[in-house]
Image: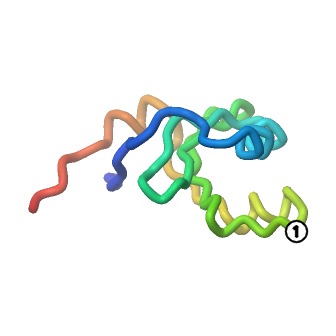
């Protein structure tokens, strides 16, 4: 399995986003150019991609995470070891 992603900014942009991840026991470790996060789930140690630009402030945290989360990799090591350079 391979995937395309570019780790643009390795910091949280807003305190509000940190609270979203803390609620789901995840640690965001990278952000893409669109402001979406790559995060490590502390319970199952899997990597997920969170679409924060689709977050609905009127919906519950559970609903938002369920609808805006994409499973990426079985572990952080697997995630890092399966990067590849995109050919132009």
Q: Which colour scheme is used?
A: rainbow
Q: Please determine whether, in this image, residue 71 is positioned above or below residue 8.
A: below
Residue that mark 1 sits on: 59
Which residue is found at the position 79% from the left and 36% from the top? 22
Left or right position of 10 against 80: right
**Residue at left offset 55%, top offset 54%:** 36
How far from the left and from the top, in percent, is residue 3? 35, 54
Q: Is mark 1 on a helix, strand or loop?
A: loop
**Can you give x and y, in whole percent of width and height, for residue 73 in the image?**
49, 45
**Image coordinates for residue 4, horizontal then vertical, percent:** 32, 55
Q: Residue at x 56, y 48 (%)?
A: 37
Q: Toward the viewer: 16 or 36?
A: 16
How crowded is the residue under tag 1: few (<14 C-alpha within 10 Å), some, or many (20+)? few
Quadrant housing residue 47: top right
Classify residue 57 as left or right of residue 2. right
Relative image position of residue 51 (x, y in whole percent):
60, 61
Q: Which residue is drawn at 48% across and 59% down?
A: 34
Judge from the rendering whether residue 35 lies leftward or rightward of residue 19; answer left or right: left
Question: Where the C terminus falls, by quadrant?
Answer: bottom left
Residue toward you, 57 or 6: 57
Outermost residue, left side: 88
> What number of labels is visible?
1
Q: Is residue 43 left or right of residue 74?
A: right
Q: Where 71 falls versus 7 (above or below)? A: below
Quadrant in the rendering for residue 63:
bottom right
């Amino acid at each position: 399995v391979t995937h395309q992603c570019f780790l643009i900014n390795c910091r949280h942009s807003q305190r509000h986003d940190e609270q979203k991840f803390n609620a789901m026991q995840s640690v965001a470790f990278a952000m893409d150019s669109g402001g979406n996060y790559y995060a490590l789930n502390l319970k199952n140690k899997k990597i997920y991609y969170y679409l924060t630009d689709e977050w609905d402030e009127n919906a519950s945290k559970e609903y938002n995470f369920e609808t805006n989360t994409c499973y990426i990799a079985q572990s952080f090591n697997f995630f890092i070891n399966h990067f590849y350079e995109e050919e132009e």
